[in-house]
Amino acid sequence: MTTFSITTLGCKVNFYESEWIGERLVNAGLVRLEERESCPDWAIVNTCTVTGRADRQSRQVVYQTARRCPNTKIIITGCYADRDPEALRALPGVVGVTPNSAKASLPTKIVPDSPPTPPVMSLRSFGSHVRAYLMVQNGCNAQCAYCIIPKVRGRSRSKPIETVLREIETLTHSGHPEIVLCGIHLGLYGHDLTPRTSLGRLIEAIEAAPFEMKVRISSIEPMEFTEGLVRRVTDSEKICSHFHIPLQSGSGKILRRMRRPYTPQSFEALIQSIKKHLPRATIGTDVMVGFPGETNEDFKETCRFISSLPLSYLHVFPYSERPGTLSQSLDGKVVESVKKARVAYLLELGKKKREAFLSSWVGHTDTVIFEQRKGLRHWVGKSTHYLPVYVSSERNLLGAHLPVKIVSAESDFVWGEI
């Protein structure tokens, strides 16, 4: 019996690709072990390189695996494998480094006589997870000054609408009541297809499909979240009213230095448009602090801007220099202690935004998909609006899809009654 494990770091696309690799290996007769369950014959590490911290975490996984399981053969893949394959080959226990461009052929490196690599990744199930990710797009055409991802993922490429619909149907029949559409540059979905299509048309096709499920849109850039897309989501009964729209900075000057093709004013107009059509929509954003040239006044401008917006939560992170990016050569580097202080301030602001948003749901009802049990009687799930919801019930609610009335709010979650 040949065994394997997969450790995944980074984005939803990476997690989707890991599930696809795992599904192929299981179909080839291998047995998948959970991380740290025991020492597998093969350990796959699907890495991220979006920040220096992600690099360190990827290396730590390899070192820990090699130390704990000295006889395990380690294969590294993912974005770090594209950016610096030689450094990864030198790590202990590593027998292979597979770039993203060859990730689909990774199973054949472990099982040479496994079926040929299909032209398009397509999953039958997302393992034991209640919510399933579905990669509909890969690659990125943007030229943000700080980002290495276009160099390690390549140009945007999309799955045809018919392929996406078949995969949604398969995942729904496998017992997943919610599908998350994900991509590296999701807003460019369909622009590379012939005939050209769009994310809005994909949503229309999903809405018209006969199968029942909830669909959530992953992160989408503000310049690609058009008024037409807002209206399509508003009119949909299947698309969740939860959107993650990266801001990065509230300073127009810093956005220009970042090569982000929008302004704070256009970002604000988008958020207000969404709230006009969907008043209870959950809207989260990413904020980067400490980009080269960011002064104290620039940071204050970002804080004032974020404070003025009806945002539900923030993801805050410090700028991390990436080799080969334009920002590496920019002047005005911000010292680490200042970055740390700015992150802490925005995290506190984000906490207040989140608490206010959760409290606004008390007395309202939302539909919840329950994902796990906590203790003897408590069940936890995510609602259509992505609220973390706790309920008490003697019933087995795993995978159940039920309306829940929100009765109270904590700092990070809400309590509800079925």
Image: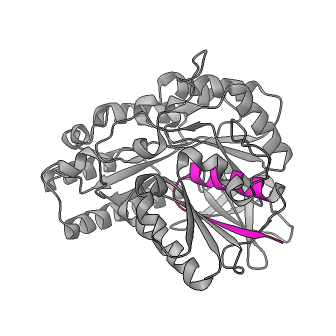
Q: Which residues are magenta?
A: 1-25
Residue 281 falls left or right of residue 247: right
Quadrant position of the N terminus in the picture = bottom right
Q: Nearer the viewer, residue 229 or 234?
A: 229
Picture residue at 46% right of the left edge, 65% below the top: 88
Q: Is residue 168 above or below residue 50?
A: above
Q: Examine the structure image and report whether residue 108 is included in the region drawn in magenta.
A: no
Q: Is residue 171 above or below residue 288?
A: above
Q: Is residue 249 left or right of residue 366?
A: left
How far across and how far down the image is residue 205, in percent?
A: 71, 24
Q: Which image quadrant is residue 28 in?
A: bottom right
Q: Position of residue 191 (x, y in %)?
A: 53, 23
Side of 3 relative to 362 (left or right)? right
Whether residue 47 can be seen here: yes
- Residue 270 position in % (x across, y down): 41, 32
Q: Quadrant of the C terminus?
A: bottom right
**Image location of residue 321, percent across then percent down:** 28, 57
- Please give the name of the residue rendered at 48% of the width and 56% of the height, measured from the top-left corner: 81
Q: Residue at x 47, y 26 (%)?
A: 226
Q: Nearer the viewer, residue 163 or 261?
A: 163
Q: Residue furthest front?
A: 112
Position of residue 131 in the picture relative to residue 87 (left or right): right
Of the pair 93 and 53, the residue shown nearer to us: 93
